[in-house]
Image: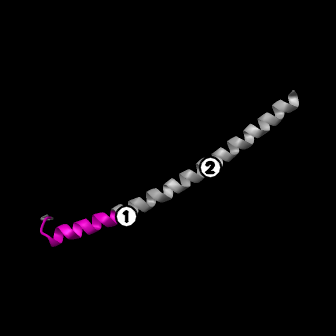
Amino acid sequence: MADFNLAHLEQTSQLVIFQIKNVNNLIAKAWFELELARSDLRELMEIHEKWEEENGFNQE
């Protein structure tokens, strides 16, 4: 019975470790995607500002 509990504990521990690694990978991927989105947004804002200046909408 103790062997079963120990084996079950080891299996659960390995599963938790796997899940934590998976979560870390997903967080890294999400961070990368966020940085790409931020870069795209900055570029879009620059293009929009230039467009406003060219069309007389940005009268500062």
Q: Secondary structure at mark 1?
A: helix
Q: Earlier in the sequence, mark 2 or mark 1?
A: 2
User: Which residue corresponds to mark 2?
Assistant: 22
Residue at 55% over, 55% down: 28
Asked if residue 6 is among those painted magenta in the image, a careful observer would answer no
User: In front here: 35 or 19?
Assistant: 19
Q: Residue furthest bottom?
A: 54
56 to 19, vertically: above or below: below
Q: Which image quarter is the N terminus in?
A: top right
Span highlighted in magenta in the image: 42-57
| Residue 36 rendering spot, x and y as whole percentages | 43, 62
Looking at the picture, how far across and down is residue 33, in whole percent?
Answer: 47, 58
Residue 44 is covered by the magenta coloring: yes
Few, some or many residues within 10 Å of mark 2 (<14, 14–19, 20+)? few
Image quarter of residue 54:
bottom left
Q: Which mark is residue 40?
A: 1
Give the Cα distance between marks 2 and 1: 27 Å
Q: Amino acid at mark 1?
A: Asp
Please say which color scheme the image uses.
Answer: one colour
Could you tell me which secondary element the residue under label 2 belongs to?
helix
